[in-house]
C-alpha cells in the first residue's frame, strides 16, 4: 500500500493465491485468498481515480520478472511433490 502504483507493486497480489494454497492447503488457502481478493478489490476500487499510470522502467520490469519466477518455482515444486506423492501411492 505504501508503494502506491510504483513498479507495478499491485502485481504482487497475484502471488497470494498460489502461496496461500501451497502453505495452508486448499480449504484455508482458498478462504484466505478470497478474503485477500476482497481486500485488494476494495483497495484498488477505492483508489481508481487517484492512481496515476505506473511508469515502465527497469524496476517495474525486474518486479514482474521476479513475480513470474517465484510463481514458476512454486508451480514446479508443487508439481514435483505431487508426482512424488503419486508415485509413492502407486508403489504402496
Image (tube, rainbow, N blue to C red):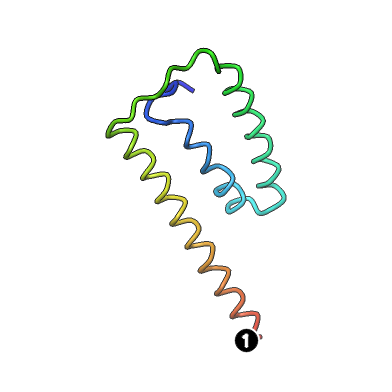
* Residue nearest the viewer, comparing 41 with 85: 41
Question: Is residue 26 left or right of 50 when viewed as pictured?
Answer: right
* Residue nearest the viewer, comparing 24 with 9: 9
Question: Is residue 14 left or right of 28 when viewed as pictured?
Answer: left
**Crowding at label 1, few (<14), some or many (≥20) Cα neighbours within 10 Å?**
few
Question: Residue at coordinates 62% horizontally, 28% vertically from top-left?
Answer: 41
**Considering only vertical position in the picture, is 76 above or below 50?**
below
The percent position of residue 47, horizontal first and vertical second, equals: 55, 17
Residue ID for mark 1: 91
Q: Quadrant of residue 73?
A: bottom left
**Label 1 residue SS:** helix
Q: Check the image and name the residue furthest to the top.
A: 50
**Considering only vertical position in the picture, is 77 above or below 7?**
below
Q: Quadrant of residue 40?
A: top right
Question: Residue at coordinates 55% horizontally, 48% vertically from top-left?
Answer: 19
The percent position of residue 23, horizontal first and vertical second, equals: 58, 51
Question: Is residue 59 left or right of 70 when viewed as pictured?
Answer: left
Question: Residue at coordinates 47% horizontally, 62% vertically from top-left?
Answer: 76
Report the quarter where the C terminus lies.
bottom right
Q: Check the image and name the residue furthest to the left.
A: 58
Question: Residue at coordinates 37% horizontally, 45% vertically from top-left?
Answer: 66
The percent position of residue 22, horizontal first and vertical second, equals: 58, 54
**Considering only vertical position in the picture, is 88 above or below 11?**
below
Q: Check the image and name the residue furthest to the bottom.
A: 91
The percent position of residue 91, horizontal first and vertical second, equals: 62, 86
**Considering only vertical position in the picture, is 83 above or below 32?**
below
Count the labels in the image. 1
* Residue nearest the viewer, comparing 78 with 64: 64
Amino acid at each position: 500500500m505504501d508503494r502506491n502504483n510504483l513498479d507495478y507493486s499491485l502485481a504482487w497480489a497475484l502471488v497470494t493465491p498460489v502461496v496461500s494454497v501451497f502453505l495452508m492447503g486448499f480449504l484455508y488457502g482458498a478462504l484466505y485468498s478470497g478474503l485477500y481478493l476482497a481486500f485488494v478489490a476494495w483497495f484498488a476500487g477505492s483508489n481508481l481515480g487517484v492512481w496515476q499510470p505506473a511508469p515502465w522502467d527497469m524496476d517495474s520490469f525486474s518486479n514482474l520478472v521476479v513475480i513470474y519466477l517465484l510463481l514458476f518455482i512454486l508451480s514446479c515444486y508443487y508439481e514435483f511433490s505431487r508426482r512424488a506423492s503419486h508415485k509413492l501411492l502407486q508403489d504402496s
